């Protein structure tokens, strides 16, 4: 079956702009979680959505937001981009919530560069 | 805040050698996972350990969860070039997954 699909794969934005990243989970998966990966901070949890509701949120400023649609597809948005937002943004999906311990499957990520 | 420190951060060894990667925390986790990430791809789950003291083997890889469920180790026997990648531990706690700092492993043919 198809894996987790993230779009776009690569993008370049200017400071102050906003960006929206999309994630299509594996069919039948209802949980989508987002992570930011940078060389300095590693892989950090952003937020998790399950059945269109935000279940949990990491320690990121309010500029980072997300949502999930009824078909489980999810988007994350970063407003007023800063240079430090340059990172690989990873989406992961699972049948149940992350806290249930079910296996999560990652997409290939969206590479964001802020200039 | 739960933190997971991995050591070493970088490791480069010859094919055929053995190695151990460590994942340590001051926090207790209900379970711990190990992932491998290759360039241009997302992390892929290797194993989940749940019980303190648990040992799991996956071919040449041996994973151990500490008795107190605060630490874990990954041992690779007779490393091969295909083992090259970024290894990440991740602990379940507070309803979320916290990832370790990562160990970048390079196996030299």
Image: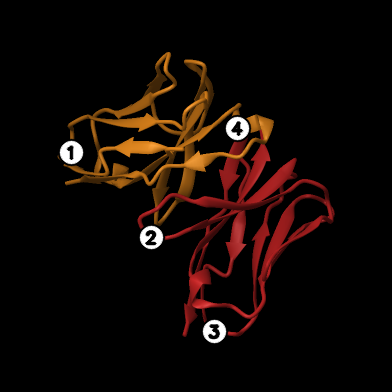
Chain colours: A orange, B red
Position of A57 with respect to B31 (left or right) is left
Q: Residues within 10 Å of mark 4 (few under 14, many from 20)?
A: many
For the residues beneath circles 4 and 3, the answer to whether they share a chain is: no
Which element carries disc 1, helix, strand or loop?
loop
Q: Are marks 4 and 1 in contact (CB under 8 Å)?
A: no
Q: Which residue is mark 1?
A: A15
Decide: is B60 above or below A3.
below
Q: Which residue is mark 2?
A: B39
Decide which of A13, B37 is in the foreground and name it.
Answer: B37
Q: CA distance from mark 2 to mark 1?
A: 27 Å
Which element carries disc 4, helix, strand or loop?
helix
Q: CA distance from mark 4 to mark 1?
A: 33 Å
Q: Which residue is at a point 75% across and 40% down the rendered structure image?
A: B30
Which element carries disc 2, helix, strand or loop?
loop
Q: Kindly identify which numbered label has been placed on residue A98.
A: 4
Q: The residue marked by circle 1 belongs to what chain?
A: A
Q: Which residue is mark 3?
A: B15
Q: Which residue is at a point 82% across and 55% down the rendered structure image?
A: B54
x then y, percent, for residue B49: 74, 50
Q: Nearer the viewer, mark 1 or mark 3?
A: 3
Q: CA distance from mark 4 to mark 3?
A: 36 Å
Visible in this render: residue B97? Answer: yes
Q: Earlier in the sequence, mark 4 or mark 1?
A: 1
Q: Residues within 10 Å of mark 3 (few under 14, many from 20)?
A: some
Q: The residue marked by circle 3 belongs to what chain?
A: B
For the residues beneath circles 2 and 1, the answer to whether they share a chain is: no
For the residues beneath circles 4 and 1, the answer to whether they share a chain is: yes
Q: Are marks 2 and 4 in contact (CB under 8 Å)?
A: no
Decide: is B3 above or below B109.
above
């Amino acid at each position: 079956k198809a894996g987790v699909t993230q779009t776009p794969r690569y993008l370049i934005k200017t400071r102050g702009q906003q960006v929206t990243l999309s994630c299509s989970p594996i069919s039948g998966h209802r949980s989508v979680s987002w992570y930011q990966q940078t060389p300095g901070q590693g892989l950090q949890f952003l937020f998790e959505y399950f059945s269109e509701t935000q279940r949990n949120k990491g320690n990121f400023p309010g500029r980072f937001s997300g949502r999930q649609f009824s078909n489980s597809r999810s988007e994350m948005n970063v407003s007023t981009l800063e240079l430090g937002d340059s990172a690989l943004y990873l989406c992961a999906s699972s049948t149940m919530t992350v806290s249930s311990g079910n296996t999560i499957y990652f997409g290939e990520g969206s590479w964001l560069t802020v200039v | 805040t739960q933190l997971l420190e991995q050591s070493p951060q970088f490791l480069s060894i010859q094919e055929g050698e053995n190695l151990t990667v460590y994942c340590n925390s001051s926090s207790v986790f209900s379970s711990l996972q190990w992932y491998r990430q290759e360039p241009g791809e997302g992390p892929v789950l290797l194993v989940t350990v749940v019980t303190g003291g648990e040992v799991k083997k996956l071919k040449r890889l041996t994973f151990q969860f500490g008795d107190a469920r605060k630490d874990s180790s990954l041992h690779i026997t007779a490393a091969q070039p295909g083992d090259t990648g970024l290894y990440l531990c991740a602990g379940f706690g507070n309803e979320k997954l916290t990832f370790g700092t990562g160990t970048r492993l390079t196996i030299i043919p």
